[in-house]
Amino acid sequence: MGELRYEAPDTIEAAVKLLARANGAARVLAGGTDVIVQMETDLIEPELLVDIKKIPQLREITAERGAYRVGAAVSCMELIEHEGFCRAWPGVIDGVKLIGSIQVKGRATMAGNLCNASPAADSVPALIAAGAQVTIAGPNGVRQAPVEAIPVSPGKTSLAKGEIVTSFLFPARPPRSGDAYLRFTPRTEMDIAVVGAGVNLTLDAGGTCTSARVALGAVAPTVLLVKEAAEALIGTRVGEAALDKLAKAASAACRPIDDKRGTKEYRIKVAGVLAGRAARQALERARQS
Amino acid sequence: MTNILEESGFDPNRKLRIVGTSPVKPDGRDKVTGRAKFGADLALPGMLVGKVLRSPHPHAIIKFIDTSRAQALPGVMAVVTRDDFPEIPPGTGEGDLTRNVMAREKALYDGHAVAAVAATSESIAKQALKLIRVDYEKLPHVIDAVEAMAPGAPILHEHLRAEGIKGAEDKPTNVVERQEFRMGDVEAGFREADVVIEREFRTCPIHQGYIEPQACVANWTKAGRVELWCCTQAHFGMRDNLASILDIPKEEICITGAEIGGAFGGKTIMYAEPLAIQLSRKAKRPVRIVLNRNEVFRATGPVSGTHSRIKMGVTRSGRFTAAEAEMVYQCGAFTGSMYYNGAQTMFTRYDLKNAKAVAYEVVSNRPKVNAFRAPGVPPVVFGVESVVDELAKAIGMDPLELRLKNAATEGYTTIYGETFGPIGFVETLEAAMKHEHYRAPHSGPNCGRGVAAGFWWNRAGDTSGKLRITADGSVNLLLGTIDIGGSRVSMCMMAAEELGIPLERVSAVIANTDQVSYNRLTAGSRVTFSSGIIVVDCARQAIAELRRRAAAAWNVSEQEVVYEDGTCRLARAGGAAPLSMAELVKRGGPISCSSTLAVTGAGPGFGVHIVDLEVDRETGGVKILRYTVVEDAGKAINRHQVEGQYQSGAAQGVGWALNEEYIYGEDGRLQNPSFLDYRMPVASDLPMIEAVIIEVPNPKHPYGLRGVGEVPVVPTLAAIANAITSAIGVRPYELPMSPPRLLKLIETAGTSKS
């Protein structure tokens, strides 16, 4: 076991350089609510930790012509306390609010939640439903990718060596849009999703759904974007029949495993139930927006 | 002269100033501000970090352990294995103890300690563990107790022979023992019944869930004495056990109990302490071992899981005619489930004439069980109170009315032979029935209400303590019982009440094992009762001494001196000015009183729980809406502390009922050794739990108290199961009543109806 090196650069370029040049295992340290716990329980033994919290632009939330850019080191509590963002993306906030306790959320970040690549990550289904993009800096420059392109399997991301997520970009919101995220856990909090469902939809002036995105967590190796479930809503007024179709499509898309957090059978059933409930809530929010 | 056990001086009409109020506990401030010294907080000069290597296999012969590479690592000061512990034959109490703290012939569960190191830093210690090579020969394992009883099951202990089973004496077995309790004629009783219901129940082992992992500091001094600071609720018992497994005279071991961050029975036996002592002996430096949560879950005491079959009969008019039970207790790798508690208490509270309870204890490849509030009782009362609920429904009677009709009263002789003195079960049931919660309607299509009752003896036993009056007239108590539930404040209150002085003038510290005589462990709801008697005895001795001194000062007989509110005065008016405690200490020197008694006279406790809840029919999730605990305390010395006991019992029971379970993989390894995946309830899972204190005094105690630590968890499992049954119309027979299980139950019921 080598000595652990800790670096806290103040520019994105310096962080990328450190990670790209690391010989052994290197980790980005944002809030550390996963990394530190994994180190403590000997799941990972990194030789380099690159703390990105000292990079000023990664700590910013900025509005860009109706769109929002959220830096990778913005803590969940900072986001929860941002009134404008909360109004625009209540479903994303639903997910963010479920990440651990208030103390944990004071440290934890959405980018960390995404890059930890757990299929049960609470912010990720809502981020995918929102159609959020990530900006990635790396040795070969900056690139953009949709959130759903980041996790590839439990604990693994598509990021190349030296790449870091620097921010999330949320598109400008059309009127009559709403999103929601719900998860099922046996406990009310301090738990990990057995199933999670994020729904984002937009209505036209007549109340017909013009676009929708549905994402499910903890029912496959990565968070699923379920097109069939979204299609069940598009072109409808999101009535009982459409919701029923949505629930069935959500259940049909699940490819879960039996594990300590839930059974296959149970996850498939509850995914449909939660997708339906999340859609109702998103609908309510779209009507009120 | 009669002693306090023969004549407690209990007076129902006594005017009380302090007992029965709710002052804040004096140790609370330091605890919430982080200044209290818990097990991991003690540091000594030159102290080393100890770490334990644990078996990854549930069942394996340990062929060889090579520690040479670990020992050669710079910074490693000592390594210990089984070779550093005296050989004690297996199958004896001490033989089990030593094998549980350090595996000898075999590793018997995932997490079983196989070696330990002491090093100058935590990272060196961790690195050293990786350098130890253990040569295992893996054996087939068995996790479930019923499977462990089956022919051909892997045998854990070759020496084990089932006691109490005819014809099973010659073959090795996993059954530790069979015990049977009976009274009356069960068969005849069932013949008198109009309705007989027989059901089977399963519960799983749960962890006590204390927040503070075990921690200890051991210092083998140059003089050859062992000093040990640790988290324990049984410092005298641990001293004696350490002496026997380490072959050290008891007198050479001194144990100081740290402030304790939750125990609930789980800190009654030793784990890393003997390892730390042997490491300190070898390294010639103090050694601290702090377990992490993974180790706590894998290697420290769960409570037994049980399988039970329960049969009860009732007449149309609501009289129980007979009850019968057969139970299997899983105890982990070594005996310790206290399975006999369940057999003795499960029906006790009803005035049954005919009853029979048979209990088996079975070993399997899981950590050795440890005590938990009312050890062995809640999982079988889950079955009994579920059957009682079904019987009430079958004869169309209110479930509390049925319990009241059959409630045991003073003079009833139990299945284990005790004849009850004054008890408060009837009063408790009546209070529950009159309570606004029970009378309030509960509505909603998926809402339900459940009730259940429970009993625990409450314990007493050897207890020793001291009381000093200091030069300024303050009083200091030296208590021999570890405070795990807020008992110190109650001791101070009883001393202040007896002496008639303000509570602020009384302080209390917990003695180490050198400072007072032997004390039975803090368990069984015995401490406020037993140590309370010691405190009152000491206070009365102190008053007698103060009066003697005043009488001598005034040259009168003691009968002419009245002690009142911290001063002595002459009984007749006029004459000398009163003398304060401080003045009397000045006159005759320090006053110190002690009391050491084999305390008896604990009063049985009874409780009734009422719970309302809602079931989500689409997910199987349960939300507790309202919870009321009604229980007889005898006398609440500190009402807040008693309420806390009631509420915490219900809270822990909710976790046990709904979500807590150990999940083992096919490989016999524990898959959820963390609070994230071992789902204890969090604050937001619970409503405010209402605590209703009933006071039917126990005259054997000077203030009439019984004990309140165990009863509050006993009825919870059944109360919740009964409420779920009322909400969804189908009964769960298995714990935990987790969302997947309930959803399946709801769907099965739906299918069978359609």
Image (cartoon, rainbow, N blue to C red):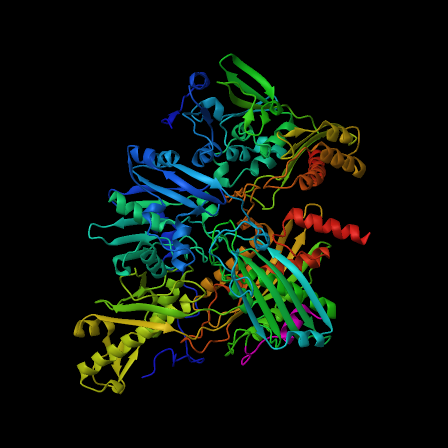
Q: Main secondary structure of the magenta part?
A: loop
Report the front residue among B619 and A94.
B619
Q: How many marks?
A: 0
Span shown in magenta: B396-413
Measuring from the top left, give residue B98's x and y in whole percent.
38, 53
Q: Quadrant of residue A119?
A: top right
In this picture, residue A280 sits left or right of residue B90: right
Identify the residue at image location x=62%, y=35%. Answer: A218
A276 is higher (above) or lower (below) than B398: above
Q: Residue at x 44, y 80 (%)?
A: B13
Quadrant where the N terminus of chain B sits is bottom left
State the image coordinates of residue A22 (x, y, percent, origin top left). 42, 19
* Residue found farthest to the top: A140
Residue B700 percent location from the top left of the image: 43, 77
Residue sitting nearer the eye, B38 or B239? B239
Rendering quarter of residue B29: bottom left
Q: Which residue occupies the extreme right position in the image? A: B754
Q: Nearer the viewer, residue B178 or B396?
A: B178
| Percent coordinates x, y for residue B651 in the rendering | 54, 56
Residue shown at 27% from the left, 63% from the top:
B515
Judging depth in this view, the residue of A133 and B666 nearest the camera is B666
Furthest toward the front, the residue is B170
At a point 31% along the width and 52% down the height, the residue shown is B229
- Residue A96 appears in the picture as rendered: yes
Could you tell whether B701 is left or right of B47 in the image? right
Q: Is residue A197 magenta?
A: no
State whether residue B573 appears in this view: no
Reply above or below: A3 against B644.
above
